[in-house]
Image: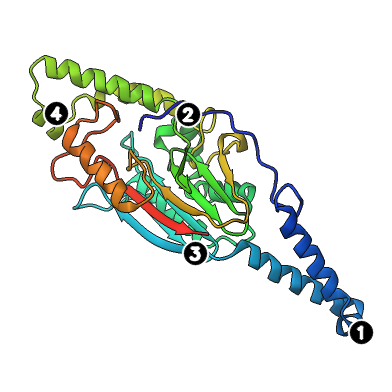
């Protein structure tokens, strides 16, 4: 996808019960309720152990009140190839919602006999998120998901994977944590928070898409037709060598989940207060992310009709192949918190 280069985002402070994270009225309400509960005659008659239990129960109840539940409004996960299984994934649990985008393989090496590397990475990450404790923080998530991928590497393969990132199990993921009230963005993914777009693009994606668009125009000028290029995108192989070079920057200048250490500063985090919010999480298969699934699909359909080679206003490293559902797998989920 073509986005602006990523900015340096400040590392957010951990969520805590302080005036920095909760508005003053909510904070006073929590404090007043706890004091009132602990000064009740029945509570005062309890010993210290039971008094502490009562304190923790009230505090937990108040936290649950502030954090609230998640209400899914609509969701969709569509593979680009109608005859195959996609590399996108969607996870919904009582405490987490995540969209996972497995990376298309750039080499012939396979970690699984039955799955592409991108689908294998997606499945591993989806299984890990579905089992995460609700108290999982961003730091624990990054450590855990890295270990989950790395456990599928053979030890003898690690030197090769260190030198050749294109052989790794790689994916991007955007996660919403109910308890932390945070959105975690690792890799090329996007979200809307009450209509405001947040993205985390790879820094070289726009350059690669522009190179491919230039090559497509050159081939069109040389006599190839649009239909020929849609059926066999001979411009894409031209950018693969440069694409492999940029992959050496994985978890150096941009983040991905690939079984290797993910620098915290490369992960974009969106922290929400305790007001109601409507959130959309999506993979980059939607070049124009809109507040609703129908609008996003309409914009994608218009792109397909007007520029199926993806070389105009929206430039991509892939085109719309004939008979496919899109130029890439795509996943969308909209929910309220």
The residue positioned 53% from the left and 27% from the top of the image is 253
Camera-nearest label, 4 or 1: 1
Q: Residues within 10 Å of mark 1 (few under 14, many from 20)?
A: few
Q: Examine the image and state in which quarter residue 68 appears.
A: bottom right
Residue pointed to by mark 2: 163
Whichever of labels 4 and 1 marks the residue nearer the N terminus, that label is: 1
Circles 2 and 1, Cβ within 8 Å, touching? The answer is: no
Whichever of labels 3 and 1 marks the residue nearer the N terminus, that label is: 1
Q: CA distance from mark 4 to mark 2?
A: 33 Å
Q: Secondary structure at mark 4?
A: helix
Whichever of labels 3 and 2 marks the residue nearer the N terminus, that label is: 3
Instruction: Tell me the tag on residue 45.
Output: 1
Frontmost residue, 29 versus 54 = 29
> Can you give x and y, in whole percent of width and height, for residue 187 in the image?
47, 38
Residue pointed to by mark 3: 93
Q: Secondary structure at mark 3?
A: loop
Residue reaching furthest to the front: 25
Q: Residues within 10 Å of mark 2 (few under 14, many from 20)?
A: few
The residue positioned 43% from the left and 38% from the top of the image is 188
């Amino acid at each position: 996808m073509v986005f602006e280069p990523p900015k340096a985002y400040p590392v957010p402070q951990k969520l805590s019960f302080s005036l920095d994270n909760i508005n003053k009225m909510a904070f006073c309400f929590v404090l007043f309720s706890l004091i009132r509960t602990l000064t009740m005659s029945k509570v005062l008659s309890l010993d210290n152990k039971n008094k502490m239990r009562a304190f923790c129960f009230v505090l937990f109840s108040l936290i649950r009140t502030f954090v609230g539940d998640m209400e899914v409004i609509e969701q969709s996960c569509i593979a680009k190839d109608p005859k195959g299984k996609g590399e996108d994934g969607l996870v919904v649990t009582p405490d987490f919602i995540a969209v996972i985008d497995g990376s298309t393989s750039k080499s012939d090496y396979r970690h699984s006999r039955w799955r592409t590397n991108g689908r294998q990475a997606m499945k591993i990450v989806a299984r890990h998120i579905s089992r995460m404790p609700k108290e999982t923080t961003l730091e624990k998530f990054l450590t855990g998901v890295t270990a989950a991928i790395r456990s599928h590497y053979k030890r003898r393969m690690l030197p090769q994977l260190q030198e050749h990132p294109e052989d790794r199990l790689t994916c991007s993921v955007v996660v919403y944590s109910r308890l932390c009230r945070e959105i975690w963005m690792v890799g090329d993914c996007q979200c809307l928070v009450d209509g405001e777009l947040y993205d985390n693009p790879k820094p070289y994606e726009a350059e690669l898409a522009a190179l491919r668009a230039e090559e497509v125009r050159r081939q069109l000028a040389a006599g190839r037709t649009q239909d020929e290029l849609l059926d066999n995108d001979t411009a894409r192989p031209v950018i693969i060598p440069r694409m492999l070079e940029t992959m050496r920057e994985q978890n150096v200048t941009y983040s991905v989940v690939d079984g290797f250490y993910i620098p915290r500063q490369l992960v974009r985090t969106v922290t929400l207060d305790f007001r109601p919010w409507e959130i959309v999480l999506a993979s980059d298969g939607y070049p124009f992310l809109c507040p609703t699934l129908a609008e996003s699909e309409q914009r994608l359909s218009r792109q397909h009709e007007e520029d199926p080679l993806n070389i105009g206003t929206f430039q991509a490293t892939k085109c719309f192949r004939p008979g496919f559902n899109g130029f890439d797998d795509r996943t969308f989920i909209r929910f309220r918190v």
